[in-house]
Image (cartoon, rainbow, N blue to C red):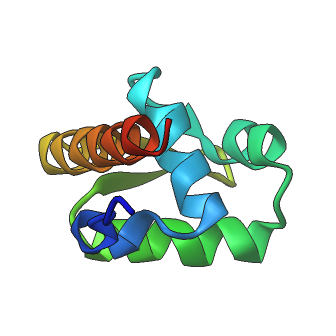
Amino acid sequence: MIKLDIHKLNKAFESRVRLGIMSVLMVNDSVDFNTLKDLLQVTDGNLASHSSALEKDGFIHIKKEFSGKKTLTTYSATKIGVKAFEEHINILEKLIKKID
């Protein structure tokens, strides 16, 4: 039986919402709140709480600006976030290859 080292996976990306946020940000320089919410099909609160957690870990940058009286929130991955997510995906790929 093959042992799988799942402890190397990054806990910050265990949530499907956080996994989705990072996946979108890996292929886009930045994404606005409504676009990200629509792509992931999540609620405002769900997106806000998960993005805040990723920002706290230093994996994403959240920028808030005003356009007239409306708030414009955009998200982008940080260099640390890109590296951490790539490592997470690489470990997942290694785990999958061991199972095959």
Q: Is residue 76 left or right of residue 41?
A: left
**Residue most toward the front?**
1
Q: In this rendering, is residue 3 above or below 33?
A: below
Q: In this view, does 19 lie above or below 7?
A: above
Tell me the residue at 76%/49% (across/down): 37
Q: In this view, does 96 lie to the left or right of 44?
A: left
Quadrant in which the N terminus appears? bottom left
Does residue 5 appear left or right of residue 46 in this picture? left
Q: In which quarter of the image is residue 25?
A: top left
- Pick whichever, 71 or 13, lies toward us: 13
- Does residue 40 show up? yes
Picture quadrant where residue 6 is located: bottom left
Give percent across and percent down for residue 55: 33, 67
Residue at image position (34%, 59%) is 2
Residue 66 can be seen, yes or no: no
The vertical placement of 66 against 17, above or below, is above
- Horizontal placement of 44 versus 18: left or right? right
Q: Which of 95 and 84 is in front in this view?
A: 95
Q: Position of residue 69 (x, y in %)?
A: 69, 54
In the rendered picture of this protein, how many numbered marks are placed on residues?
0
* As drawn, 25 above or below 18: above
Of residues 33 and 65, the one nearer the viewer is 33
Q: Residue at x 65, y 48 (%)?
A: 33
Place of residue 68 in the rendered image (x, y in percent of width and height, measured from the top left): 65, 44
Question: Which residue is drawn at the image coordinates 38% and 48% (left, top)?
Answer: 95
User: Which quarter of the figure has residue 27?
Assistant: top left
